[in-house]
Amino acid sequence: MTFTEARGLVARGDLAGNNTFDVLVAVARRGSVGDRDQARELLIRLLARRNKIPPGADGLLQALVREHGLYPYLRDVVELSVADRLAYEAHRPESMTDDRIVFHTEQALVYERLLAGENVVLSAPTSFGKSLVVDAILARQDFRNAAVVVPTIALMDECRRRMSRLDHKYKIVTHGSQALEARNLFVMTQERLLEVRELPPLDFFVIDEFYKLDPAHSDERSNRLNIVFHRLLNTGAQYYLLVLRN
């Protein structure tokens, strides 16, 4: 079975009989020839249809999940080998109160770089799970002031609701008219952040969909985002810039 044929089976949910085994073999082959990104992406799509996978294929599925570092998808954790259990625990962010939250390998690498104080520019597929890393670093680090810039009001509201779990640590600020406190987390679109006349000293900022900084996006919103980026960059704060690809 070719990798393209395997993709088609997963897309249709046609995983009966030997189809699941053939798909898993195709994933293993694609990963072994060096195209691990494609192999991992198909494996994630397969895991989304896990209820259709025959029980007999579970052992091979678990092995591929471990090989690709997709620890959040592991089942029967208590039955893992000591080495696999240690790897699983190493991918659990200490800052999160929910013990069920576990990073996959790429998330863990980004998280560790941010913890080390590095600036990170990340291009990743939509399955990456960008929000979890942002949440974990904001929960873990002792920032005084931080900012998360998102492209739309809808994403701003979604982010604000998600960040409400940190309201014991930060004042969540979504509008320039709000009074600031000792520790603040600005969750805003670029337009709203421009309305804030005087930002307090920032320790960290995130810009989602930073590819819109490209001058090729010569619209008014792109211009505003560039102004916001330069304003934030001039603070000297650590940054995490994100673009997700399909």
Image (cartoon, grey):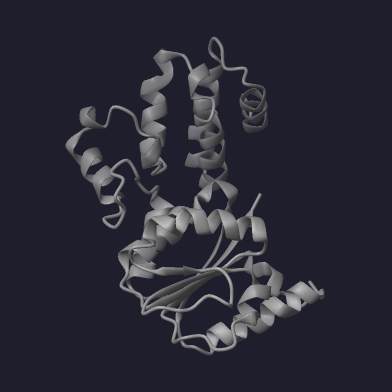
Residue 149 visible in the displayed image: yes
Task: State the image coordinates of residue 19 (x, y, percent, origin top left).
Answer: 56, 16
| Residue beneath the point at 55% across and 41% down | 41
Q: How many marks?
A: 0
**Does residue 65 sit above or below 163 in this rendering?**
above
For the N terminus, which image quadrant?
top right
* Between 168 and 88, the one nearer to me in the picture: 168
Residue pushed farthest top? 17
**Which percent across, then down, holds residue 208?**
59, 65
167 vs 178, nearest the viewer? 178
Residue drawn at x 39%, y 50% is: 105
Q: Is 157 above or below relative to 214? A: above
Q: Residue 13 appears in which quarter of the rendering?
A: top right
158 up-or-down from 61: above or below: below
Pick whichever, 67 or 213, lies toward us.
Answer: 213
Name of the residue lying farthest toward the left: 82
Identify the residue at image location x=29%, y=50%: 97
Q: Of residues 35 and 168, which is closer to you in this image?
A: 168
Quarter of the image for residue 221 reads bottom right
> Residue lying farthest right?
219
Image coordinates of residue 122 in percent, x first then y, are 53, 64
Q: Is residue 34 visible to us here?
A: no
Task: Indicate the quadrant where residue 232 lies.
Answer: bottom right
- Give the image location of residue 100, x and y in percent: 32, 40
Q: Is 221 placed left or right of 157 in the picture?
A: right
